Amino acid sequence: MRGDRMTSEANVRTGPAEGQPASGSGANAGEIDDRALVVRIVRAYQRAIARDPDSRASEWTAVEDDKKRPIHAVLMSGDIAAVTAILRDPGRTDLFYGFDNMCATLAAAAAVNKGELAKQAAELLVRVAQAIGVYPLPNKYFVAGDARPSLASVEAPGLEDTLKLLDAALGIRVEFANPFPGEFGAATSRGIASYRAIQALYQAWRMSQLCGDLAAPRIVEIGAGLGRTACYAWQLGLRDLTIIDIALSGVAQAYFLGRVLGADAVRLYGEEPGAGIRILPPSAFLEASDHYDLLINIDSWTEMPKETARQYLRSAFARRAMIWSVNHEAARFTVRELFAETTTRPVARFPYWLRENYADEFLDTGVASERAELARTAVPRASRLIGRARRRFAQMKRSIVRFGPINKLITRLRRP
């Protein structure tokens, strides 16, 4: 990417995009109204590259140079028809390589293992129900005196029953958007439930729990894959969302979210501020001072150079945001080590529910919880006065009850 000559924003050719492959949702190519969205994506990509030509500071750098350079060249050419062809059927290229299995490099293996992928997704969906608490964990040991059957001998709920349990717990109808062909997972009445989509569903729920006391939390996700977590978070009512990612990943996120939630639900780099999920390059976050209540990172901090991860963590502390991390510990450093370098505040640390050998770590800098407390107590002055009077009256009653003779009298009067 370094050797390519930068192309100006004006280099966007909007000729007809004919003969494009159909989407995974079953729509014909001519029925997909994505022209304006693709034009926006190309312009935002060119702006991001002009600002952050070397923003790809991760373990994927060498991979991207090999597999993703042709995609970069098409995006910089401004050929809307060619970009549309890539975005509508990403599995023919390696645009998603590194964060989703719908890519050319993994397509053959995914097709061979589609049965295993379906089984894995079905089991993972039950695991989400257990993590959320709507289906109990199994226990092979019989508890004496317990009339309930052992869960070790009871079959897990089927896919559709599990989805109904999750519907009730989350307050939404859980669905799986499949705008692209070639997605593998468990077939349900609500779409193909892929491994990544189920992970995202749980992550969005967890975000909603972490921000439960905040009226309108501002959330930023560092490295967002395809944007599935933000998609479910949006559906759960979390509407102030920002994604920070390298430019090529931002292209994938913008198209996926624009197709699933609607083009108006995304705000791209360089566009006027407005409602929608913001998708920005790293420098737009690191060089700014926007306030956020929660910063999350799922499976990427430990795959960056350590100094890059440090920069993100410092930015999170500067903004005094809650921090939630889910990362493996098989790299050159761990998130736990980064936390230890930065703060002495306690870090909640657990195994991650949905992925073996991943650490789920949460750090509250303190300010977010203080804001939540203020939000809970920010009631009208009249209400505060009434509450104060009630507390004073209760205190007087306790004082009277503690006085011996009066206490005996009250006790006698209460007798039938």
Image: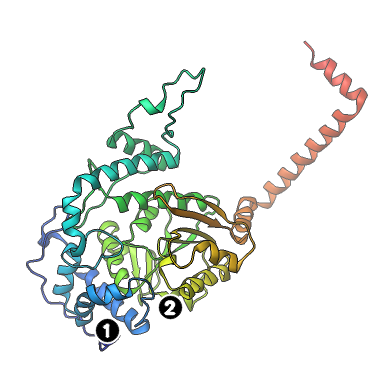
Pair 1/2: label in front: 2
Q: How many marks?
A: 2
Residue most toward the top?
A: 416
Res 171 visible: no
Q: Secondary structure at mark 1?
A: loop
The residue that appears at 43% across and 33% down in the rendered structure is 136
Quadrant occupied by the C terminus: top right
Residue 185 vs 399, above or below: the answer is below
Residue most toward the right?
A: 405
Residue 63 vs 229, above or below: the answer is below
Residue 59, percent across and down?
Answer: 36, 71
The residue labelled by disc 1 is 9
Residue 91, percent across and down?
Answer: 18, 62
Residue 98, percent across and down?
Answer: 30, 64
Residue 72 vs 262, above or below: the answer is below
Residue 22, percent across and down?
Answer: 12, 59
Which kind of residue does numbered mark 1 sit on? Glu
Q: Quadrant of residue 29?
A: bottom left
Residue 22 vs 79, above or below: the answer is above
Q: Secondary structure at mark 2?
A: helix
Mark positioned earlier in the residue sequence (1 or 2): 1
191 vs 57, left or right, is left
- Give residue 33's mark: none
Q: How is the image coloured?
A: rainbow
Q: Nearer the viewer, residue 260 or 275?
A: 260
Which kind of residue does numbered mark 2 sit on? Ser
- Give residue 283's mark: 2
272 vs 394, left or right, is left
